[in-house]
Amino acid sequence: MSLERAVRAKIASKRNPEMDKEAQEWIEAIIAEKFPAGQSYEDVLKDGQVLCKLINVLSPNAVPKVNSSGGQFKFMENINNFQKALKEYGVPDIDVFQTVDLYEKKDIANVTNTIFALGRATYKHADFKGPFLGPKPADECKRDFTEEQLKAGQTIVGLQAGSNKGATQAGQNLGAGRKILLGK
């Protein structure tokens, strides 16, 4: 098997059809439109129009101009505009797919992961009422301790590794004792 085929197989194995379906259903719910029958998930997303429509519903006018014709470069521009709007919406840069992942169908699993990252980012926008996608991100729970509390914590013996409750191995012999032979 060639290296290229091995890489493609590995990328394809990361893809989860259930996650694709869940992402598709979420997109359909947000934009209030069904995907065209007979077209695959990645084919519908490929030109970037649905993605731009999605981000424009979540953040009005995030992508002011959506190209509906004009060929490959215009559609790739849609995808790039969507990616830029994602970052402005609060999706971490590391969670955003590369344009070729979608347009050339190189890594659709990464595209789906980006949509899930967008779904998680919606939790941080109070004006968005749902539906949500993915688990709610944890909120920071900052604690402020006084100097007295910090000093008191330093005097406590930590038992994270457990305790042997005073047990020792004194008097235990397992197997034969050690013999040291001198002179040989």
Image: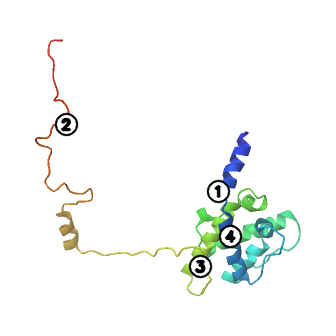
Which secondary structure lies at badge 2?
Answer: loop
Asked if the residue under mark 3 is in contact with the one under mark 4, i.e. CB atoms within 8 Å, the reply is no
- Residue 167: horizontal and vertical position, in percent? 14, 51
Residue 32 lies in quadrant? bottom right
Rendered residue at 15%/22% (across/down): 180
The mark that comes first in sequence, 2 or 1, is: 1
Q: Can the viewer see residue 97 in this picture?
A: no
**Residue named by callout 2:** 174
| In contact (CB < 8 Å): disc 2 and disc 1 | no
In the picture, the disc for residue 84 is 4
In this rendering, which labeled residue sits more in front, label 1 or label 3?
1
Q: Amino acid at mark 4?
A: Lys
Question: Is 140 or 162 nearer to us in this picture?
Answer: 162
What numbered label is drawn on residue 14? 1
Residue ID for mark 3: 122
Q: Amino acid at mark 2?
A: Leu
Image depth: mark 3 or mark 2 in front: 2
